[in-house]
Image (cartoon, rainbow, N blue to C red):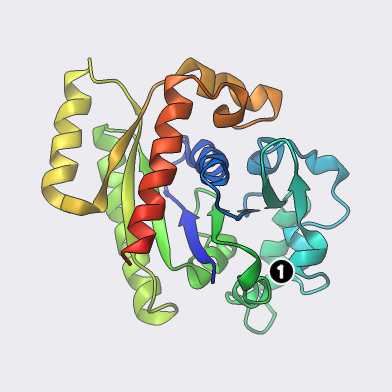
Amino acid sequence: MAKIFCVANQKGGVGKTTTTVNLAAGLAKVGQRVLVVDLDPQGNATMGSGIDKRALELSVYDVLLESASVKEAKQTSEKVGYDVLGANRELAGAEVELVDLERRERRLKGALAAANDDYDFVLIDCPPSLSMLTLNGLCCAHGVVVPMQCEYFALEGLSDLVNTIKQVHANLNADLQIIGLLRVMFDPRITLQNQVSDQLKQHFGDKVFDTVIPRNVRLAEAPSYGLPGVVFDPASKGAQAFIEFAREMVRRVGSM
């Protein structure tokens, strides 16, 4: 049975897509069967997994409107070792079309249930806003992985996200919880980042992942080649950190 996790943060530019594709590649490297679901109309997780979003015949848009199944719409990216349910600009229209449909916030849950036995992990890359798309992701997930930079504005955004998760937990998905906070783009030479990191650990305890993702040029370069950093330069510090994070995720899920 697949474990489904949203990678979410209501603050933009915190590395959600980078986290999604690199965690997926790391999990694939340690022997897990992985599906990435791109719920962002920008399609960055699709492109960052080596798949051209402009060439998609079927996408997550078709799955949400129930005109295609996950098995029909997913693409296998041989370069990165995992499957992708891709997105493109069509997905922006799904927001409007879903409003009048039955089970509008549970469309993705139903679709993924049919592919439950095919994967060990399903990672959902959510858009930064709390939209109908994000709600579909949160309604089918077992938990949320929150990538965040160790800065004070990030702490404010985190409180908003925690409140959103509580509301979804209470009203739509009793399984939903924060699996963990991942510190990304971390530079230990900056005093402020160390202070915020300490505050996170004091406040959230073991909800903060042990793995820390360093600020790394190779991770930043990788998307321009259509690859996760873990595949683009496996020896880089960023890639090594994500592979360690993948191992930590497997351990944490095993104890859930």
**Residue located 45% across and 36% down the image:** 243
Decide: few, some or many residues near mark 1? Use Cα within 10 Å; few <14, some 14-19, many ≥20. Answer: many
**Residue located 75% across and 40% down the image:** 78
Q: How many marks?
A: 1
Tell me which corner region of the image, top left, top right, bottom left or bottom right, holds residue 98: bottom right
> Could you say which is closer to the camera, residue 8 or residue 239?
239
Residue 234 in sight in this render: yes
Image x and y of residue 52, in percent: 80, 38
Location of residue 57 with respect to 17 vertically, above or below: below
> Could you say which is closer to the camera, residue 3 or residue 139?
3
Image x and y of residue 181, in percent: 31, 47
Extreme residue toward the left, this view = 202
Is residue 76 left or right of 183 when viewed as pictured? Answer: right
**Residue located 16% across and 20% down the image:** 191
> Could you say which is closer to the camera, residue 93 or residue 190?
190
Extreme residue toward the bottom, this view = 102
Image x and y of residue 124, in percent: 56, 55
Image x and y of residue 77, in percent: 74, 43
In the picture, the quarter occupied by the C terminus is bottom left
Residue 14 in sight in this render: no
Location of residue 254 with respect to 26 vertically, above or below: below
> Could you say which is closer to the camera, residue 91 or residue 85?
85
Residue pointed to by mark 1: 64
In the picture, the quarter occupied by the N terminus is bottom right
Extreme residue toward the front, this view = 31
Tell me which corner region of the image, top left, top right, bottom left or bottom right, holds residue 165: bottom left
Q: Amino acid at mark 1?
A: Leu
Q: Secondary structure at mark 1?
A: helix
**Residue located 18% across and 24% down the image:** 192
Is residue 23 left or right of 84 when viewed as pictured? Answer: left
